[in-house]
Amino acid sequence: QVQLQESGPGLVRPSETLSLTCGVSGAPVSSSLYYWMWVRQSPGKGLEFIGYVNNNGITNYSPSLKSRITISVNTSKNQFSLKVNSVTAADTAVYFCARVKWTTMMKSHFETRFYHMDVWGKGSTVIVSS
Amino acid sequence: DIQMTQSPPSLSASLGDRVTISCRAGQNIDTFLNWYQQKPGEAPQLLISAASTLQSGVPSRFSGSGSGTEFTLTIDTVQREDFATYFCQQSSLTPWTFGQGTKMEIK
């Protein structure tokens, strides 16, 4: 059974760096069959795509956060992490890590991936406040 | 970004009802559409992928349909454990975006 677990500080000061780690059990982050993703949820913005990383460390970031975030994978510890620089109160949210999986279908003679998040962590509440 | 709009934002249903939740995409997303269920204090749980593919372990009373810009999640014979918030999410283009959610409450 695959499980993901977020860990990190629950309180971060404005202008500092938010750091979270997602520990993975039951599946290797080194697998080419998955991506590893961060999503956050706040009352004001709902569920928000932060970005994902693949097993080779290639990332896809939200354009609105791209200048402030880093997502990386650590295969030796079987975990991946998120860093958000220069945080403000707007970064206060519940942060979820998730596994991205896909099914492949033929669309107009091309092999096409249908992505979805099939396993999620329980979420980590992060409050940005002085 | 592709905007996803769900309706209604909330609804009240009785046990045994048939419920329909709609999701509209701001542009054509073919069938790159997933549905999730979220209960208070928990992470979202994947119900349906690629607009209509029911995930393993999800009860067959859940079904999804649609393509292009209009999608529907249907729950036949609502059970007590179905009272939750439902989200649609597009995976056609990054950044993947979510609907604002539909909260289903017991009548």
Image (cartoon, coloured by chain):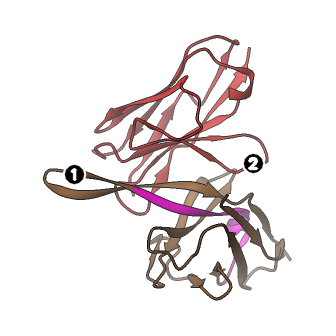
Residue at point 46%, 44% (across, down): B34
Mark 2 lies on a secondary structure that is loop
Q: Residues within 10 Å of mark 1 (few under 14, many from 20)?
A: few
Judging by the rendered image, the residue that carries numbered circle 2 is B42
Quadrant of the rendering where the N terminus of chain A is positioned: bottom right
Chain assignment, label 2? B
Quadrant of the rendering where the C terminus of chain A is positioned: bottom right
Q: Which chain is brown?
A: A
Whole-percent x, y for residue B35 in the image = 51, 40
Answer whether residue B94 is magenta in the image: no
Location of residue A69 by image quarter: bottom right
Report the front residue among B103 and A121.
A121
* Rendered colour, chain B: red
Judging by the rendered image, the residue that carries numbered circle 1 is A106
Report whether B101 appears left or right of B89: right
Whole-percent x, y for residue A110 in the image = 17, 58
Chain assignment, label 1? A
Location of residue A74 by image quarter: bottom right
Residue at point 39%, 58% (across, down): B1
Report whether B51 appears left or right of B9: left
Type of the residue with mark 2: Glu
Answer whether residue A99 is magenta in the image: yes
Chain part drawn in magenta: A86-102
Type of the residue with mark 1: Met
Mark 1 lies on a secondary structure that is strand
Report whether A32 appears left or right of A17: left
C-alpha span from label 2 to label 1: 35 Å
Pointer 2 with pointer 1, Cβ within 8 A: no
Mark 2 vs mark 1, foreground winner is: 1
